[in-house]
Amino acid sequence: MVLGPLDKRVIRTRCQACSRRRIKCEGGSPCAYCVKKRIPCIPPPATKSAGVVFVNDKTHSSSTSTSKLQPKISGQTLTLTVTLPKKVQQPKSSNFLARFFSVFIVRNDFSGGSLDLDGIVASFQSSPSLYHAAIAVGALNASKERLTPVGERRAATVAALSSYRTSLVEFQEEIRCRDVKKNDAALWTTLFLGLFELMYDMTGSGWVKHILYGTSRMLQLRGPESHLTGRGRSFFLTVRIFEISRSLAFSEPTFLNEKPWVELMGKMWVDDVSDWHPKERMYDLMLETQGLGEKVWHVVGEDTEVPSHLVDQALIDLANEGVFLRQTINDWYRNFFDSPVSLENDPWSLLATIYYHAISIYLTGLFDYRAQFNNIPFPNLPHTTIQAHVHSIISQTKLALSTTNLAGALFVFALRVAGARAVSEEQRRGILEMLVEISTRSFVVAEAFKADLEELWWG
């Protein structure tokens, strides 16, 4: 018990010998027991602080501090040095929200300048789901800082999962009570929740669900015209590459190849070309390649509905379409390098060329993996050309990861395509190292593609 200043009781102590025997210590020092036993009378050890707490109300202080207390004892000044440990703050949602904008968005550019930050912030008050989704991403990003103490990272992870759950609950309420066609905030919520899944779920299934059944479904409910101008336009231009990547990476159809959405891209640049970039045309070509893949599967699949007597002509038509698409892709590349863009100064041009190399390989794979085209001229590439594309994907992705702030998730599709054609250990090692880097930085979904390639290479 620690006696207070008004407590009139006397502090009594026992020597160590009496303390061990739990007997009364009498007679001063040496005590009667120690004199009788002829042993040294050793006083008790200095007592440790009994629950004295120093409160530091300067919450901005984060370093270890030393303060000096100078109480007067019997006319003398005794200086006591008290070391206050580093203050461990409880994670605050405002910290994670600030991190979302100042760290995550800065380090993970996925919009090329079309991200509507003003619209996002303005929607926080009316959309709790968007607010908590941004906090969840910011907190999860904070949990991945390797130099941060383990306890703080763990707390950030807990905060991320809590905010993610809150966002989902609020989102269900918002779409129940509000008109989806007028709810721009709901679009951003689905995108941020999808980003969270890319950062948290190694399998990629959560991301696919959010993109396919969340973001993409809401875009379709709103219709193409809702995304021709204004904030709907900025969102569509941001999210388009995620839907394209999903459809290519998982060989699944996409609504973006439906006529109204294809026409949207034509209308979008008629009156406003201020934010047009050559990458937009490359995105179109990626969609055309995916659409051709759907047509090929419709003919060669086991459950094809094409009559047998029409199959041969259908295969020839598909091969011709592939040859034409190859020419269009090559024309884009030539025109791109005739333009004044610089790969060193424009990250999105660098990404567009990476996609060019990836889609060139992907187009070949629509045909050379299938025996039905063995005797039909199709857009094939020589082995040396394919290897040149693989080399370009690896070298340019390394450059992008080291010199740009492009989101690592944007490179996963291209690395997977390159991995399917990588033949040397050096190529494979380079691809795996980049997938690990992407996973470590933010997007653990890269682990799924890494595991897929390891299975392909080594069984």
Image (tube, helix red, strand yellow):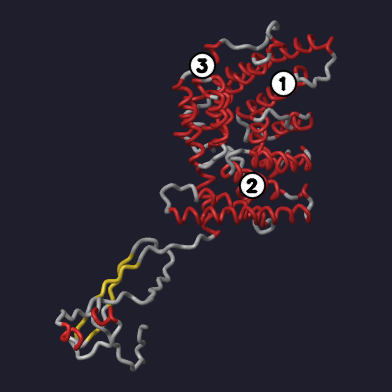
Circle on res. 393: none
The residue where tag 1 is placed is 292
Q: Quadrant of residue 167?
A: bottom right
Residue 161 drawn above or below residue 457: below
The residue where tag 3 is placed is 388
Q: Earlier in the sequence, mark 2 or mark 3?
A: 2
* Front-lying residue, 236 or 317: 317
Residue 12 drawn above or below residue 320: below
The residue where tag 2 is placed is 193
Indicate left or right for 25 with 216 as reference: left
Determine crowd level at label 1: few under 14, some 14-19, many 20+ residues with C-alpha closer than 10 A. Answer: some
Amino acid marked by disc 1? Leu
Q: CA distance from mark 2 to mark 3?
A: 37 Å
Quarter holding the N terminus is bottom left
Residue occupying image coordinates x 46% and y 48%: 145
Q: In what element is the residue under mark 3?
A: helix
